Amino acid sequence: MKPRLFALTWPLLLELLLGIGIGMVGTALAARLSDTAGAAFGLANQVFATLFILFRVIGAGVSVAVTQALGAGRRDQADAVARAVVGASSWLGAAGAVVALLAAGPLLHLVNAPAEVAPLAGLLLQTLAPALLMDAWNASMASVMRAHLRSREALGVVVAIQLVTLAVALLAMPHLGLPGYALACACGRGAGLALHVALWRRRLGLRLLPQDWWRLRRAPLATVLHIGLPGAAENIAYRLAFMVSMSAVADLGARALATQAYTAQFMNLILLFGLATGFAMEILVGRLVGAGELHAAHRLVRRALGLGLVVSVGVAGGFALAGPWLLGLFTADPAIVALGSTLLWITVALEPGRTFNLVVINALRATGDARYPVAAGAASMALVLAGGSWLLGVHLGWGLVGVWVAYAADEWIRGLLMWRRWATLGWLPHARSAHRKLRHARAG
């Protein structure tokens, strides 16, 4: 029985919703301390997300490598990849944790953190370092679970992580401030790691050996890096451009940073359906490529994209209409509420372009066509997202509205480029090559 799109999408959607929900709770708890603390929370989490890109070096490739191997009937190869990514995650996670711990100040200086925000943000970023290491393991292990179509079990782990995080945050943040959130994240990630180890053993039949946690296995990692390095490059290019835009926002002052932090929570909720659909596309298209069913993969992507466009516009419109009330949950400052509401209406125009990116880029990557997204999108990220944020937001004086207009323009430019690649079948030679290699390996 072939997996269906909805059967994979809904657990992913709930998983992402829970993650965003905890972020919103953290933001609300930080905002209760002060708008300065809310701004620090948002800025530190953006830097944290940028460091998380280190894991995309393997994260972008592990799902594709495992799903293609399973689609071709190569369980042995899929298991070799799974073990290899655990060791690689240890090294990447440790590197990210060291950077967060030792370079929090310089990183915040790079994004132009205001003087009143920087100390709080720096302390939060440093205390988040242990969570960063555990995130590396959890992200990789969850990707392997989903590739085996164990999306419900992966969702269960996320539920456990977020419940522990929420409970500890509610208890710790009123007394410890922002470091209380870091403590909550460490506790939640630790619980998730223990559950992943148990589920790998019971559901996948994969018992991790001590050397699996540190050994770098060249052959299986080569398959992962073939997809992961271009995927990471695309994510790194985006995050760097986004951090340049965040420095433009920081230049506008603490109030602008607080507005950005609060509004971004709702923007993250809006994009969830497209993101979940994109992740499901990566799993399903990878399996179809492994099995050589390329016509089915093409039809699936077109159908999923149409559904994603309708849903994303509808959800964005609903959030924009409720904007004043939603933003009032975070702050009583009428200027922040008014500006944030305007940004949510810009999101209605932004979301269709982002849906093209979320759905089609993951499908391209699943076929083995991983280099095109970064090659085609790098110029737009640098010029439109990063440069446009400074030009419109700071130099032309449009403020946050200008920054978000740049966001929308970048998403549409890159999204249409990705769709052109898919619609003109530029991915087809890569998919045929991936299937041919797997077929030859099975015959050998």
Image (cartoon, rainbow, N blue to C red):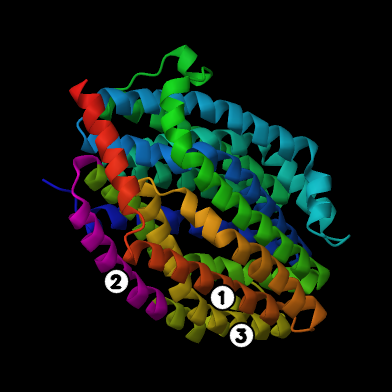
Residue drawn at x 27%, y 22% as measured from the top left: 76
**Which of disc 1 and disc 2 is earlier in sequence?**
2
Q: Which disc number belongs to residue 307?
A: 2
Q: Which disc number belongs to residue 115?
A: none
**Residue 345 versus residue 232 in the image, above or below:** below
Q: Secondary structure at mark 1?
A: helix
**Which of disc 3 and disc 2 is earlier in sequence?**
2
Mark 1, residue position: 408
**Residue 275 versus residue 354 in the image, above or below:** above
Q: Amino acid at mark 2?
A: Leu
Residue drawn at x 55%, y 77% as measured from the top left: 326
Mark 3, residue position: 342
- Say whether residue 206 is left or right of residue 264: left
Q: Is residue 310 visible?
A: yes
Q: Residues within 10 Å of mark 1 (few under 14, many from 20)?
A: many
Mark 2 to mark 1 CA distance (whole Å): 20 Å
